[in-house]
Amino acid sequence: MDTKAIRIPVILATAAFLIAAAPNVHAGLAVKFYGTAQANKLSPPIAQAIEELGVDVEGFLCFQLPLFDLENGIPMGIGVDCLNPFDDSGDEFGEGLQIEAKTFFFLRRGVIVNHGCTSARPFFAGVGNAGATHITGSIPRSEFGVEPTPIPACEEAEGVILVTREFRESSGDVRLSGAVDLSNAGAGEITFSCVFVINLDAFGLWP
């Protein structure tokens, strides 16, 4: 008997079962926000676009950098991460910052704006680069199906808050994981190496 001929249908059936049993999640667009930027040094067209979008970033420090496709490294747009640190006391788990963030993704097919909260913590000793710090966005409830319990400063953070053009029928959330070099943050300069996964529930294939 040809065991190879039997094995292929079994593998396909197993794959179909695993897909059917998987959680109901949406495929996302993964972009890399990478480079060194000075706070509030936005290009005039981007600054004007943010003003026209009507998203309030007063009091935030906004950093503009290119966005790259995580899969192939091709530039795909401009990102602006506007940050408002509101607590640097850490907690019972150790040192860290708590930061409100409004992030703008200027893409060919439109603009996506996310409002969330972020935590930044040092690397564990011996793991990663001591010159950088872990940064992680608040976990969207779509990840685990659990409603988060926001702290007071983040109660208004609600995921994707604005979309334009081809994204205008969509809603969703954004997941952040990455690292930042804060060694020159006192001078308003941060180096970012961050991955954003954008999940939109009413949008299909990406370009």
Image (spheres, rainbow, N blue to C red):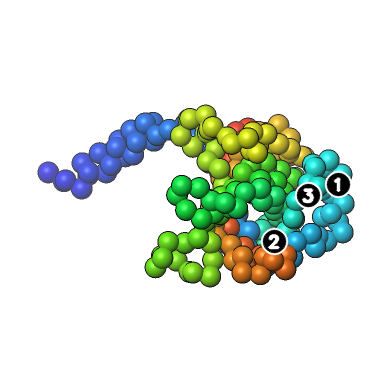
For label 1, the crowd category at 10 Å Cα-Cα, with few meaning under 14, some 14 to 19 and many 20 or more, is few
Secondary element at tag 3: loop
62 to 191, vertically: above or below: above
Q: Earlier in the sequence, mark 1 or mark 2?
A: 1
Q: Are marks 2 and 3 in contact (CB under 8 Å)?
A: no
* Horizontal and vertical percent position of residue 41: 80, 63
In the image, which disc is placed on residue 51?
A: 1
**How far across and down, in percent of the image, does residue 185 sit?**
67, 65
Q: Going from the N terminus, do you reach mark 2 or mark 3 first?
A: 3
Q: Nearer the viewer, residue 91 or 67?
A: 91
Find residue 15 and report its horizontal and vertical position in percent.
Answer: 33, 39
Task: Please state the horizontal and vertical placement of residue 103, each as a whole percent of the image.
Answer: 69, 48
> What separation in Å lies between label 3 and label 1 (alpha carbons)?
14 Å
Q: Is residue 146 left or right of residue 42?
A: left
> Quick check: 76 above or below 148?
below
**Horizontal relation, residue 190 to residue 130: left or right:** right
Q: Nearer the viewer, mark 1 or mark 2?
A: 1
Q: Residue at x 84, y 54 (%)?
A: 47
Mark yes or no: residue 132 visible. yes
Graded by Cα atoms within 10 Å as few (under 14), some (14 to 19) or many (20 or more), the crowding at tag 3 reads few
Residue tagged 2: 66
Q: Secondary structure beneath disc 2?
A: strand
Q: Residues within 10 Å of mark 2 (few under 14, many from 20)?
A: some
